[in-house]
Every structure is written in structure tokens, then in C-alpha cells.
Amino acid sequence: MRHAITTILLICLSAIAGVAAERLGLPLPYLLGPLCLTAAIATALPAYLPDGYAFPNWLRMIFIAVIGLMIGAQVTPELFDNAGRLVASLLALIGFVFVAIACNYQVFRRIGGYDPATAFYASTPGGLYESLALGEEAGADMPRLILQQFLRIIVVVTVLPIGLSLWLGAPVGSAGGMTLARPSVPLELLPLIVLAGGLGIFLGKVLRLPAGQLTGPLVVAAMLSLTGLMPLDIPQWLVNDAQIVIGTALGMRFTGLSRALILRGLGLSLISVGGMLLLAAVLALLLAPLAGEGFDVMLISFAPGGVTEMALVALSLQANPAFVTLHHIVRILITVIGLMALRLRFKDRL
């Protein structure tokens, strides 16, 4: 009973943190707000938690499925218009993923001193949930892995939107009030959303998809959207709730981390993200003429941030959000496939 009460209390506090982060104009407020709050509780006030407390994994999985449905619902036929222009940038995206993993691995292994498994899964330029799930299976140091993966997203989705906002003179992304979800979706559609999410989780387990609780629902929503049978509209309140629960769950994984470790992780993340953004900028300059898109569109397409926030930035800039979304979805797929391939290739070292 004490564990259940603690979970409810943490979620309520996280919801307040999410609203506060939104009022402050932070990117991904309903994820980063709860994450920062619960990480602070886990690192500074662990004695106030019940003995042996862990955030319920089944609850986290349910809401990860919601995020998978939202991402999959963005896969529409329009994403593949003028497919010929996409070839060069998508091929470059493959190179970007593998170069980023190789360079980041050296940063975390040589400079950070992380063990091989932790350094490897912390090196990915995307696929947050997949990297965490696969890293946990490989025996990585989860507090450090979660720290580095979330610091990657925090740095990218903070620096890039703020930088673009200063450059353009107006707020962009979620700080500008943009969203990919629908604000008003009839409650009658909720059973369909639940059914699609349940089917996706089931398929993810049966097919043993990497991070199946995310990729399974993503595939189901994408198929419904591409075929036009029953495109899903995910309400904004449900997406916010999902981010609150996921942020709370992941924040609690920081239990026991010291301030020194967090500061060290931030330093490593600044080196890692700085290198990836530099690589993204170079590729954006080279590919913009070939793709027929502006530098800003290409930079957002290659930036190693969250799919949602990068798509929101593109939407607020009217910077071809379909093009950007496709690249980030492909980036996740390439990252997952690359992780599996590299894990098999270097299984004796990880």
C-alpha cells in the first residue's frame, strides 16, 4: 500500500512540475519537468522513499505504448512524396548514425571511463527507449546510461530550439505552443486507442521487437495510418499524461547518483552532443541543395534530439515537418538496426 501511495504522490507532483515547466516555456515540459523533479527526489531525498521502492514497470510500459502510437500516427503517405529527393539525405543519415556511435563510444569509454556496455548504449544518437531497453538486457550501468541518454535529449532540445528562437526572434517548438497531438479527440475513440496500444504491445512481445512496448504500437499506428483504414488521433492530454509517467519512472532510476556523477555526465554530454551537432551542421550544408530544402530543415532533420520536439520545431518554423519527421523515424530505425548489428559483431567486447 505504501508503494502505491508513493507512486500516486510522485505522479501528482510530476504533473505539477510539468505544468510549471510549460509555464516557463521549456521544451518537452511534461517529460523534462517530471524527470528533473523525480531525479532530484531520487538523488537528494532517497530516505523519504519506502524501502525497496521501484516505480511500477507495467505502468511505464502502458504509457510508452502511447508515445509509440503517436509517433506511428505521423507516418502518412505524404511523408514519401518526392521520394527521389530523400535518397541522398537518408543515405547520409546512415553514415551519421554510425559515425556518431563510433565517436561517442570513444568519448564515454576513454574520457568517461564507462564500461563497454554502458559506453556503447550511451553512444546512440537516437532511439532513447530502445537504447535503454537493450542496454538493460546487456547489463549496462542503468543510472549512468539513463543519465547520458537524457542529457543528450535535454542538451539538444534545449540548445537547438533556444538557438533557433534567438536567431529567428520568436519561440519555436513546444515553447511556441506547437503540438503533434490533437487537443480535442472524442472520448468514444479511446477504446480504439487502447486496442491499438494493446495489440502493439502484444505484437512487440510475440515478434520480439527491440523495445517492443514502443516499436510494436508504432508499427500498428503506422499501418493504420498508411492504409487509411483507421488513422489514430491521439489527444494532447493523453500524450501529456504519458510523458509525465515516463518522466517520473525514468527520473526514479537516478536513485543513488551523486552530484559529482551528474556534473561529470553533463560534461561528457556536452562533448558528445557538440560533436553530433557539428556533424549535423556539416551534413545540412552539403545536402540542402540536393534535397531542395533549407539549411534549417536539414539541421533539424539530423539533430540528435527527440522525435516529437524536433518535429514540433519544424512545425513552428513551417520547415517541412513531414520531411523532418520521416528522417527522425528513420534515424530511430537505423539506430535500432545498427545497435543489433554492432552488438552481434562485437558481442565478445560488450
Image: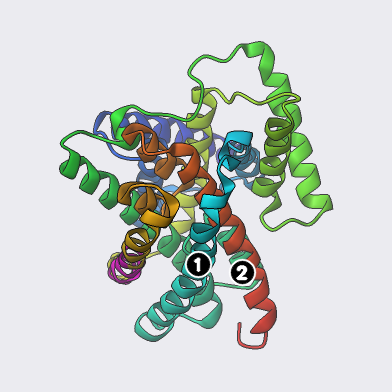
Residue at image position (82%, 54%) is: 207
Q: Quadrant of residue 18?
A: top left
The part of the chain drawn in magenta is 267-278
The three-letter code of the residue at mark 1 reads: Val
Residue at image position (45%, 60%) is: 149
Q: Quadrant of the N terminus?
A: top right
Q: Identify the secondary structure beneath mark 2.
A: helix
The location of residue 120, given as percent across then percent down, is 52, 75
The location of residue 321, given as percent across then percent down, is 44, 38
> Label 1, label 2: how many angstroms apart (C-alpha)?
8 Å
Query: Along the horizontal axis of the image, is 222 left or right of 170?
Result: right
* Cβ–Cβ under 8 Å for marks 1 and 2: yes
Query: Is 153 situated above or below 67?
Result: below
The three-letter code of the residue at mark 2 reads: Gly
Residue 97: assigned label: 1
Q: Quadrant of the C terminus?
A: bottom right
Query: Along the horizontal axis of the image, is 215 left or right of 261?
Result: right
Query: Along the horizontal axis of the image, is 317 left or right of 76?
Result: left
Query: Along the horizontal axis of the image, is 310 left or right of 5?
Result: left
Residue at image position (61%, 11%) is: 186
Q: Is residue 275 magenta?
A: yes
Residue 338: assigned label: 2
The location of residue 302, given as percent across then percent down, is 42, 56
Query: Is 123 situated above or below 161?
Result: below
